[in-house]
Image (cartoon, rainbow, N blue to C red):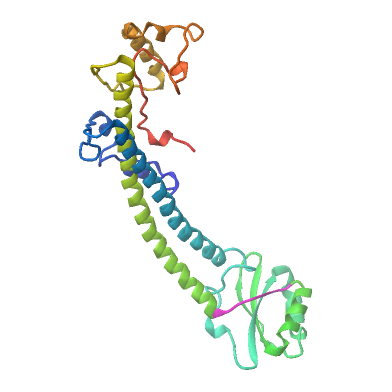
Amino acid sequence: MKDVMDHATDKVLENALANGMDLMSYVTQFQWDQARYPTAVPLTSLADMISKEISQVEAELKTQTAAYNNVKSSLQILEHKLEGNLQNRSLNDIVKKEDLIVSEYLTTVLVVVTKANYLLWERTYESMSEFVVPRSSRKLYEDQEGGVFSVTLFKKNLSEFKSKAQHNKFIVREYSYDLEEQMQEETKQLSVHKKEQYGVYVRWLKMSFSQAFIAWIHLKALRVFVESVLRYGLPVNYQAFLLQTDKKRSKKLRKELASLFVHLDPTATASKKDVNCDIPGLLQQEYFSYISFQISTNVLDYSY
């Protein structure tokens, strides 16, 4: 979302919702979705459901992203051809069809000449080939660097003219009015297609973000249940709470919680040297006398 919306904070937050709610509201009002994740099935099946769901989202994300990026890059390539300096940009907004003479024997050539070489061009262009039409040079366009000149000559002498023009540091543009017009039309069509694809992509991102976030919170709830049973045994007897804090107050909160629940596991407050934590995948500094998982609802904090 951040990429496709050019990191526009407001737009990202408008679309980063869960079930149509902002993330904090969804988390604080969380209720287990029985229809999506029925609790009658085994815990491993629930975990597999969530895993498969997210795998499908990830696979579809690659497909959707590739489709959008293909259109975007194709448009950028065409737009690059339409822009730039006189040596490589499109000339269709400069050249009119009536500026060109194309017949069985004659052709009009477009030449880029720097301002410093204007006088040289006027003195030499008629002598670059035996069959250049006299006084046929016309300046069609000019910018800060130079200008685009048209000149008419016989087709059979085009190669000779190009060679001598290059020798004098004039740039003969390879130009076809019809091809350039076709390219402009393709650019317009791609621009429309990009807007359509953008809408499709953003709608999919919004829907899939919601789906992924909801799955993530259900997985958190599932872990709270499993870890509580593993830690405290059966029968199931625990209470889950949501504690909202920030970075400034989190350290103080941890201290208060450690004091409040020290009786659940006195070893949790011991130093790292004094206790050996044998819980697989759990680092000592993450171990508390109570079950704890962090949920960040500020998606704009994420970096990659």
- Residue 234 in percent (x, y) is at 26, 16
The part of the image, by quadrant, that contains residue 163 is bottom right
Residue at screen point 63% across, 84% down: 108
In the image, 126 versus 77, the foreground residue is: 77
Tell me if residue 213 can be seen: no
- Residue 291 in percent (x, y) is at 34, 18
Side of 202 relative to 167 (left or right): left
Side of 12 relative to 148 (left or right): left
- Residue 67 in percent (x, y) is at 43, 57
- Asked if the stretch drawn in magenta spans residue 172, the answer is yes
In the image, 69 versus 276, the foreground residue is: 276
Side of 191 relative to 135 (left or right): left
The part of the image, by quadrant, that contains residue 38 is top left
Q: How many marks?
A: 0
What segment carries the magenta color?
170-177
The part of the image, by quadrant, that contains residue 155 is bottom right
In the image, residue 113 sits, relative to residue 260, either above or below, namely below
In the image, residue 281 sits, relative to residue 206, either above or below, namely above
- Asked if the stretch drawn in magenta spans residue 258, the answer is no
- Residue 125 in percent (x, y) is at 74, 82
Q: Residue furthest bottom?
A: 104
- Quadrant, the N terminus: top left
In the image, residue 101 sits, relative to residue 2, either above or below, namely below
In the image, residue 83 sits, relative to residue 175, either above or below, namely above
Residue at screen point 33% across, 44% down: 15
Residue at screen point 49% across, 6% down: 274
Tell me if residue 158 can be seen: yes
Residue at screen point 56% across, 70% down: 90
